[in-house]
Each structure stands twice: as structure tokens, then as C-alpha cells.
Image (cartoon, rainbow, N blue to C red):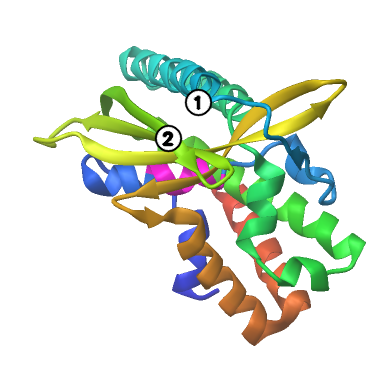
Amino acid sequence: MSARFRLLADGSVRAGAGAVVAFCFALALAPAAQSQSGGKGLKRSDACSIVQARVFTDDKARALLKEIQQQQKATAEKASRKTQLQAYKEILRQTFAYDTVARSLIGPYWRKMSPSQREEYALLISSILESTVSNAIYNLSVVDYELSKVSRLGKDFAVSIAVSVEDENEALPVVWRVRCFDNGGGTTRMGIIDVIFRNVSVIAGKRREMTDIVSKQGVGQFLRLLALERDRLRAQEK
């Protein structure tokens, strides 16, 4: 396993700017049941407003911060940690458009995968990133956040957030790219599809790394590498 590939599952996080980078990465790649759908993503909708994007993001950010602060006060016991990690997962499953993110990460290679390969990829990436995001958030030292601006970003929304972290003199700038989806039955839902830290797209950076691996190794070997990484992470959690 190359060190470059292992960046996908690096759960070691420290306070400060480095923690926020890892946090952004983890959030952008967080797994959920939707990632196991075999690639049937939701259709984009134009029905959502800037006000809805602000309310959605503020609600999810507040819920996540609350859980982080509760964890910081909790005793670091195995059962307590397990309960806290599950709480993070539940919030994230309501926040991120996982299927859209999974497809974005491998760019044109998604179309080159067979249906069975797409399903395998979704399952593997979910398992890998489940460990990554849980540990990244658990080790954060976020103090507060401020939602400062919401604007249009093409057909999506750019939500600017200033994140206050322990041992950092200034709040760190994070932008969540939020998309409106047609949920069926005349309803919509919103989901985050990218995280931008200091004007750099987390998804774009990780897409370059992942597509480089696929182009050099092939889809089959890429999936085998994912399986090895999943098994390594599972072994560490025992």
C-alpha cells in the first residue's frame, strides 16, 4: 500500500489548522448507506433557496459541534467512545450527499466500472471512510463556529463558515458546497458535496490522487487496494 493511498484512511488528527484540514477531508468523504446504492444518485433540483441553505447548514453544524463538545467532556471509556462515534455518524448521514461524493472521487472512471464494480467500490469506500471520519471528528478540538455568508456557486450554494479551534489565534475559513436534490414526491433535500479549505477543494484534490491510482493500477487493482485498506482498518479496531 502506498503512503499516498493511505492518506485516504489517515485518522490521526491534531488541534489547529492540520486538524481542520483532516476534518474537512473526513467530512467530505464521510460514508453512509446511500453510498451503497450502486450509484443511483439523486437528481439535482433548483427549488431550494439561499435561506434554506443557511438554515440547513447552521442546523447541521450546530448539531455536530454539540456532539463534539459533549465528547470532550465525556470520560474516554470504550463504551462512551463507541456511543459518541455513532452519534457523529447519525448527523453526517443527514448532512452529506455521499453518493454524489463517491462518484466525484473517481471522475471518469465511474463510467468505466461495471455495475458490480460500482457496488463493490461503494461498499469498500464506505467501510474505509467510516473509520476515518469517526476518528477524525473524535480527536478534534473545535471550540465554536460562525456561519458568515451564503451565496450561489453555479447551481449550488457556497456556505462560508469560520471554525474556531484550540491553539489557533484566528478562526479558520471553511466553505461547504451545498446542493439541492429532488427527493421525489415534490419534496427536496440538501446535502454537502464538497468542502473548500482556504480556497482549495478537498474533493478535487482527492480526485486527482484516486484517479491517478486507477489510471496506473487499473480498476481491479484499485478495488483490491481498497479491500486491503478496509481490512487493515478493521484489524486496528479490534
Magenta span: chief secondary structure: helix
Image x and y of residue 233, in percent: 58, 52
Name the residue rendered at 52%, 71% in the picture: 208
The image quadrant that residue 146 belongs to is: top left
Quadrant showing the C terminus: top right
Q: Which of these two is toward me, 39 or 167? A: 39
Q: Is residue 158 above or below residue 21?
A: above
Q: Give the labeled residue for mark 1.
A: 50
Image side of residue 209 versus residue 22, left or right: right
Residue at 67% across, 64% down: 226
User: What span is in magenta?
Assistant: 23-29
- Whether residue 231 is visible to the viewer of this picture, yes or no, is no
Disc on the earlier residue, 1 or 2? 1
Numbered badge on residue 151:
2
Q: Quadrant of the N terminus?
A: bottom right
Q: Which residue is pictured at 56% across the width and 43% down the height? A: 131
Distance between the Cα atoms at labels 1 and 2? Answer: 7 Å
Give residue 196's mark.
none
Q: Is residue 105 magenta?
A: no
The answer to whether residue 45 of the structure is visible from this angle is: yes
Q: Where does residue 193 sit, x and y in percent of width and height?
A: 57, 44
Percent position (x, y) of residue 84? 50, 21
> Residue flagged by tag 2: what amino acid is it?
Ser
Element class at badge 1? helix
Q: Viewer-proximal residue, 229 or 217?
A: 217
- Say if the magenta span includes residue 27: yes
Q: Amino acid at mark 1?
A: Ile
Q: Are marks 1 and 2 in contact (CB under 8 Å)?
A: yes
How many other residues sit within 10 Å of disc 2, few (<14), some (14-19) or many (≥20)?
some
